[in-house]
Amino acid sequence: MGVRMGPTERPAHPPEGTGPAVGPLFRRIDLIILPIVFAFDVLVFSQFLRTDVITPAQQVGVVCYSVVGIGLLIFRRRAPLLVFGALLTLSLLAILLTDLYSPVLPLLVALAAVAELRPLRVSVAALVIVLLPTVLLVVDAARAASPQAVVTATIGSALFYSAVDALAWGIGRWARRQRRQVDSLQALHTAQVQEQQVETENAILAERLRIAGELHDIVAHSVTIMVLHAAGAKRVVDTDPDRAKDSMTTIEASGRQAMGELRRLLELLRDDEGRTLTTGSPLPGLAQLDTTISSVRGSGVSVALEVHGEARRLDASTDLAAYRLIQEGLTNVTKHCGAGARATVSLDWSAEKLTVAVEDDGAGANRLAASMSTGNGLAGLRERVAVAGGDFVAGPTETGGFRVAARLPVAEAGDPAKSRKGTLPDRPTGTLPEQATGPGSAGSTGMARPDDSSGLARIDP
């Protein structure tokens, strides 16, 4: 039942030749990087501060020339190779035509962008090409040095420019690896979220089909009762009209219930038409609550039952939903807390609603099972309660325990108050004394605690 899923594969890194996805044209970090690059490049790699060798007009020219290079850097993430080529041309022209300005930093920023956004072979080629302006800068440094310092100036400038070239290229490759790791983690997270959604949808689908099968059994039971009483009324209608009248009353009540359950069934199956439903054994209800609690006590969990208000008649599907919530809640306590835990089952009856809750104290011997939960059981319970026309909440309590609760509608007051299968017999308000019986299991679909603690922890009757 449901969709069969294959194993989830970890997303692999994209091929080296593809490169990371193109980023936005402008980032806020550029508001910091580009002004620093402009100021440092103009002040360090030009004669801008030497007013004895540069005129004001030449200063303006240096600034404008640098602004052009900085402006090109804005497009480095969209077209890193074109920007690198343009800045390489500007650097070569400035180095060859004038001694006033030698653009260095804009070209290094463009080299870092190529190393980050393009494959290794392309970035290595860009690093080799950068050696051309580096050689010209080393030659200029050697020419400007005195005869005694030519060797020192040549070696020093060569080491300096080679180091900054390698540093810019290395920063770009490091940024590329970081981006690829982030993209891989994001892809993995997306795949896990999608897998969790599929598992939840499958769990809901399985629970919906199960509920539909149970509603099918309820309708079949009601129709069977109607047929039997109709046959009996037919036999005694002439000899015992009163018995025939009672049978007709029962038929009317069963028909109303069957129509209500049939409406729920059709609404539930609005997206699941064409699926085959199979009938099963008679469905449980609150009448089997004592047996379920006793079996849970047999596993070492202390369970107290509190009943408030006067018990009222429930429709069969509502009775089943209340029972399933208690059954799965107690089994959840057994699985997640284990022996030594204390749980309280409460039934609060009012004129129109029944509030059912299962709450534990958070103690117990088994505290590791919660980490293995998928949360699918809560989705199934929420679906079941919604089909019954109720409200469902679940979440941690202030005392460190966990609580699941639902508010379910009772049968309409106008319906004949016949005694039905699954209706809880009257009990005095209070706590049922604890008693251990033989070992057993409550049976459950494996309701899990949610990782999200945002759910309400209590429903007030």
Image (cartoon, rainbow, N blue to C red):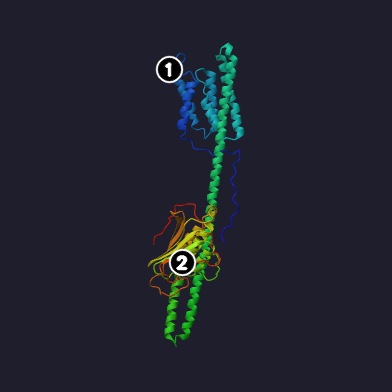
Q: Amino acid at mark 2?
A: Pro
Q: Amino acid at mark 1?
A: Pro
In the rendered image, which quarter is residue 118 located in? top right
Q: Which residue is mark 1?
A: 56
Q: Position of residue 268 (x, y in %)?
A: 48, 63
Which element type, helix, strand or loop, lies under badge 2? Answer: loop
Foreground mark, 2 or 1, reads 2
Q: Position of residue 365 (x, y in %)?
A: 53, 56
Q: Of residues 388 and 110, which is closer to you in this image?
A: 388
Q: Position of residue 54 (x, y in %)?
A: 46, 16
Q: Of residues 259 and 333, which is closer to you in this image?
A: 333
Distance CA(mark 2)–CA(mark 1): 99 Å
Q: Which residue is mark 2?
A: 433
For label 2, the crowd category at 10 Å Cα-Cα, with few meaning under 14, some 14 to 19 and many 20 or more, is few
**The N terminus lies in quadrant:** bottom right
Which element type, helix, strand or loop, lies under badge 1? Answer: helix
Tag 2 and tag 1, C-beta contact below 8 Å: no
Left or right of 121 in this view: 249 = left
